[in-house]
Image: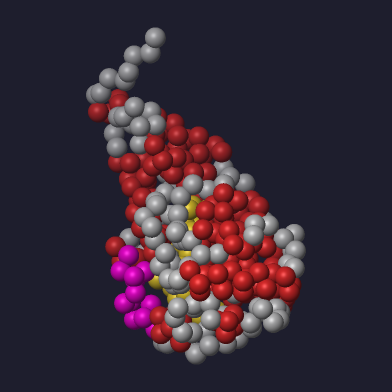
Amino acid sequence: MRIDIPAFDQAAAEAAQHRLDRLTKPQGSLGRLEELAVRLAGMTGNPRCRFERRTVVVMAADHGVTEEAVSAFPQEVTAQMVANFAAGGAGINVLARQARAQVVVVDMGVRTRSATGVLDRRLGPGTRNMTREPAMSRAQAEAAVAAGRELAGQLAAGGTSILLTGEMGIGNTTAASAVTAALTGRPAAEVTGRGTGLDHGALAHKIAVVERALALHRPDPADPIGVLSAVGGFEIAGLAGLVLGAAERRIPVILDGFITGSAALAACSLAPAAREYLIASHRSVEPGHRIILEALGLEPLLDLGLRLGEGTGAALALQLVDAAVAIRDEMAEFAEAGVSERLDG
């Protein structure tokens, strides 16, 4: 798999920093908004980049591991929520409208075929039960990654200049936990959380399920495709491909929470340079998300106790991207405003 990711553009980042330093404020006084503006310049190669067309990609799939009773919700909810996304009634639809973003819903492998208005990239009616056999074949994992990369290219050709990641799939926090444990080497108990709201006993059972899957397959962290094949999900692999496809085209990616973070972890295991194109929107309450953020070296913009998924945290963070761009472009420089700069010495 050939992946060519351009280097972070240091010259563009420095030009953006120079502009920010001339604005009517003490240097650095807008903190991480300024850091964000500089990073966006380096990602895009444009110190005055703007993001007129923004897209939230919500990938959905079912998981065979739900046979092990790892979720508080039945598997049918995946298809029901996909229909809700398509109808515009979910949390991500509301927040995307606030952030002026379109929502693209992708069926990567929902058990029940999806509603009108959903992109069909199905690789099957959900993965297999990873506690008994690989979640998917290696060919399916490769096809899911390829589908994500292809979709990033199609959206870029349509004018999308920033991508947000979202997901849906009952059982996918179990898959994300297994992927995270496999790629980071951390114990299942450290990366597995309550997901849809499991009680203490159900959480202990879920951890044991992840441990069984890892013991059965012993996935090699040096082989990310093998990890995705053994314990991943169609939507997780697809989102990994989306990250790679965006990075190949200098398109910034705003990550949502734990599940999309596990996809980004897989993407960066395949191509470490992709990390430069990632923005962490928030810190999920899922314990594995903190470990993913540490592994990727990312500091989230928000910490709101979110655990819905769908891309909701990413949509909220997009408004901070807009704020950073507006400050860079609309705030006056000292000379323009007739404001004296500070005296040094």
Colour scheme in use: secondary structure
| Residue at point 43%, 67% (across, down) | 309
| Residue at point 50%, 34% (across, down) | 14
| Residue at point 30%, 69% (across, down) | 94
Quadrant position of residue 27 = top left
Q: Is residue 88 magenta?
A: yes
Q: Is residue 159 magenta?
A: no
Name of the residue lying farthest toward the top = 345
| Residue at point 34%, 70% (across, down) | 91
**Which part of the image, by quadrant, shows the C terminus?**
top left
Q: Which residues are magenta?
A: 83-95
- Out of 221 and 5, give the one closest to the viewer: 221
- Out of 54 and 271, give the one closest to the viewer: 271
Q: Against 115, is 335 above or below? A: above
- Out of 328 and 198, give the one closest to the viewer: 198
**Which part of the image, by quadrant, shows the N terminus?**
bottom right
Q: Position of residue 50 (x, y in %)?
A: 40, 51
Answer whether residue 151 is visible to the viewer in this image: no
